Amino acid sequence: MKIVLQRVKEASVKINGEIYSEINKGFLILIGIEKGDNKEIIERYADKVIKLRIFPDENDKMNLSIKDVNGSILVVSQFTLAGDCQKGTRPSFDKSAPPDEAKKLYEHFISLIKDYNVPVKTGVFGAMMEVGLINDGPVTFILG
């Protein structure tokens, strides 16, 4: 599993030129599910995302979580995160989980985030999407 997590002032997903979902202050999470990923891995990363303290406190130190700032999360599936570009010039996607399996784990990740009572918006699994954001910082982390 690979996650690219960006602290954002706002983020959105457009499908067919129309806004599908959008958030203000929070996280944009791009998530790629790989072969071998399972519910335990998904649960560990969901917990990590909620507990990460990457918002500034009153002293401008990264010390506050998404819950502390009443932020929202936009989760977008991105199988290309599992792409391997080490050999040649064309990425290999051999590490990507099969779509049916990946979709179930993606949906499980979203349900876990919702269980923490954090507002969650999503893209559409497998759809062509335009993802827009205003990065806050910029602050970007790669998990996985």
Image: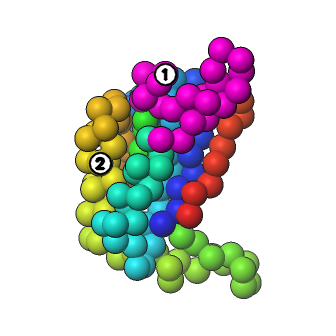
Mark 2 neighbour density, 10 Å: few (under 14) some (14–19) many (20 or more): some
- Amino acid type at mark 2: Leu
Q: Is residue 124 visible?
A: yes
Q: Is residue 28 visible?
A: no
The answer to whether 101 is drawn above or below residue 111 in the figure is below
Disc ID at residue 10 = none
Dot 1 or dot 2, earlier in sequence: 1
Q: Position of residue 32 (x, y in %)?
A: 47, 62
The answer to whether 44 is drawn above or below residue 74 in the figure is below
Q: Position of residue 116 (x, y in %)?
A: 31, 38
Check disc 1 and report its element: helix, strand or loop. loop
Q: Residue at x 31, y 66 (%)?
A: 39
Q: Quadrant of residue 82 in the image?
A: bottom right
Disc ID at residue 112 = 2
Q: Residue at x 56, y 46 (%)?
A: 5
- Amino acid type at mark 1: Val
The answer to whether 24 is drawn above or below residue 39 in the figure is above
Reading the image, the residue beneath label 1 is: 69
In the image, the segment drawn in magenta is 51-72
Mark 1–mark 2 Cα distance, whole angstroms, equals 19 Å
Work out whether residue 127 or residue 53 is closer to the camera in this orientation and state it: 53
For the image shown, how many numbered marks are present on the structure? 2
Toward the top, the furthest residue is: 58
Residue 60: within the magenta? Answer: yes
Q: Residue at x 29, y 71 (%)?
A: 101
Q: Residue at x 47, y 24 (%)?
A: 68
Work out whether residue 54 or residue 140 is closer to the camera in this orientation and state it: 54
Q: Main secondary structure of the magenta part?
A: loop
Q: Position of residue 29 (x, y in %)?
A: 49, 45
Q: Position of residue 135 (x, y in %)?
A: 64, 32
Q: How is the image coloured?
A: rainbow
